[in-house]
Amino acid sequence: MQYSSDEISVDSDHLNQDGTRSLKYLPHWPAVNIEFQDLVYTVPDISGNKVILRGVSGKFKSNQLTAILGPSGAGKSTLLNVLAGYKVTDATGSVLVNGRPRDMRVFRKMSRYIMQQDLFQPMLTIREAMKVAADLKLGHDLTNVEKFELIDEILDLLRLTKAADTMGHLLSGGELKRLSIALELVNNPPVIFLDEPTTGLDDLSCSQCVSLLRRIAHGGRTVICSVHTPSAKIFEMFDHVYILANGQCVYQGQGPNLIPYTQSIGLNCPVTYNPADFMIDVASGEYGHEYIDKMISSVDNGRCLNWTPYDAIVDNNYRNEKISGQYFDELEEEINPKHLRARSSNWEQFCTLYKRRTVQMWRDSSYIKLRIYMIFFLGLIVGGIYQGIGNDATKALFNFGFCFTVTIAFMYIPLMPVLLQFPMEVQLLKREHFNRWFRIGPYYLAMTAAKLPLQIFLAFAYITMIYVMSDQPLEYTRMAMFYSIAVLIALTSESLGVLISSRLSLINGMFVGPICTVPLMLLAVYGIGYGREIEISPYIRIAMSFSYLRYGLEGLIDAMYSYDRADTVCPDGEVYCMFAKAKFLKMVLGFEDVNFLVSIVALIMYYLLFTITAFYMIKIRISTTHKNNIAVQYLGRFVKTHLNFAAYKY
């Protein structure tokens, strides 16, 4: 469905009433003013709970670039997280949008949060990354021609046109920051939050970045950013500043009013001193904590505004008319529900994400080549070790070792890369999902489906090498059974890796993953070689049923030695070959009752179990308001607190 004629600008040089250019084809948003009252935020600490925000209040207006300032630990990022909705479960107080209580479901659709770390999708150019963002956020509302025209406008606005065809990993720090902003401007959000947008940039890049943010804000948006120590030049660019000290508001208002404000409480800023640096020193307690208390009392912890005379008149009107409930109804527009709907369907999101991941995967040629080289190298080693044993009756027990080696190989080869890669991908996943790029379902399906072709190809290449070199029976049915079991082991192991890394960091995942495989391997081979001479306890049998490797090994053995396999060859010079008959070998090993179909079904069930559970755990991890993760959050906090306490002691 296309936008109606009153929702788009038909001229690329369309101007807003204030003279700033709007983005073509995108809907017009009403002004969005954000007001917060008595915000309190606490986190667990060694001694109990640590209060980060202490009942702060304030108001941030549209068409203004607002900066949240303060010394380290003052609560800048926390306030930004709470206002953006990134941290809401532990915050108390109220947040109003255009004078009405904030609806998080609606607010998240019209706001975007650009975090401090400049994460980017690898192996994509700026233009390709922008096209992905446009496809996900705009869906089929615009044609490809219109999308590229919109992308060119945004790149021109943020001065990225010259670098449009440059890969992300080749961009400078300033270009990466502007790319992060450009990606979120695709659907013209009315509210933009930025955490430390100038961190890591030189003076020129900082000035350019803040200048662009001001230009974006004056285009009709509410832009709020946290800044640590801005220079005097950058400080003058902010339309509105909000200063924190120890989780409380000590000033909010226009930058030029800051020095007269400090003079009114008895503090004089030196003539050659940067006002922002001076205020940071004051907020840090360098001039005495009594001045901090005076400032908090003067602004009533953010409830009072330090306005210019003109703004004071507007504010008084606001105070007088807010009581009747008519002020915002008369002066501010309602949010149009049409602008809040999801622009792309689940299928469109899946197709876009699948294409993006496939392009990224195949462009990473060094990684693919490394995997192919390792597979062929490992195949030559294993094939050489077990060369010619498949049909040799004197080496039947070694053939069991061959099947176990295949099982272990298809456990570790898919498992380890996931444990390394996915924890690093989670941060980018958090950002894109929080900013409403896509739903978790299409993303997870695309991630799973994109890996299948390469995974299956490498598995087939490896199995073919070792199968032929080890002289296994060349029967199509038997080979298909062997292949299917091996591929299912690989897919299940990969799902297990995603499950483990869905809740753990890189270091913890690399530790827990290999540890978890040890009992799986032990249970897979328990009791083998004793036939029916030992009685396995019911508890061990139950435990063995939890090892998908056991089902994989049983499936491989059944594929090799069942279904009327001919006797293996007894070499010349051997008087008697004990394990020439497949049925006797299976009985000695304890595999006489195994069934290939049971192994297939069990592996599929474990694959689905790990895949679905991993999806649920990922959904919990990136959710900010999930109701079913209270126990997980409490356990995580308990572990973190006690680990921090142990580190503090030692």
Image (tube, rainbow, N blue to C red):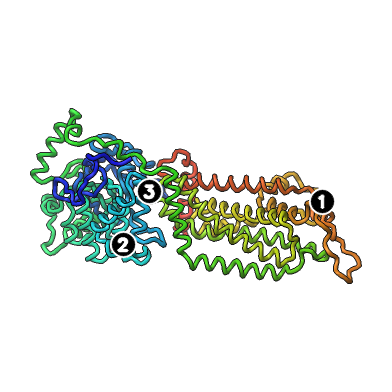
Question: Which label was assigned to residue 352?
Answer: none
- Identified by mark 2, the residue type is Ala
Which residue appears at 59% of the width and 57% of the height? 456
- Per the model, the C-alpha gap separating discs 2 and 3 is 19 Å
User: Secondary structure under badge 1?
Assistant: loop
Is 15 placed left or right of 495 in the picture? left
Q: Quadrant of residue 557?
A: bottom right
Q: Position of residue 242 (x, y in %)?
A: 22, 49
Which residue appears at 61% of the width and 68% of the height? 376
Q: Quadrant of residue 196?
A: bottom left
User: Secondary structure under badge 2?
Assistant: loop
Looking at the rendered image, the disc whose residue lies closer to the viewer, 3 or 1, is: 3
Is 578 placed left or right of 172 in the picture? right
Q: Report the front residue among 318 and 33.
A: 33
- Identified by mark 1, the residue type is Ile
User: Residue under circle 3?
Assistant: 136
Q: Position of residue 644 (x, y in %)?
A: 45, 55
Q: Quadrant of the N terminus?
A: top left
User: Residue under circle 1?
Assistant: 534
User: Residue under circle 2?
Assistant: 164
- Per the model, the C-alpha gap separating discs 3 and 1 is 60 Å
Q: Outermost residue, top direction?
A: 324
Mark 1 closeness class: few <14, some 14–19, many ≥20 residues within 10 Å: few
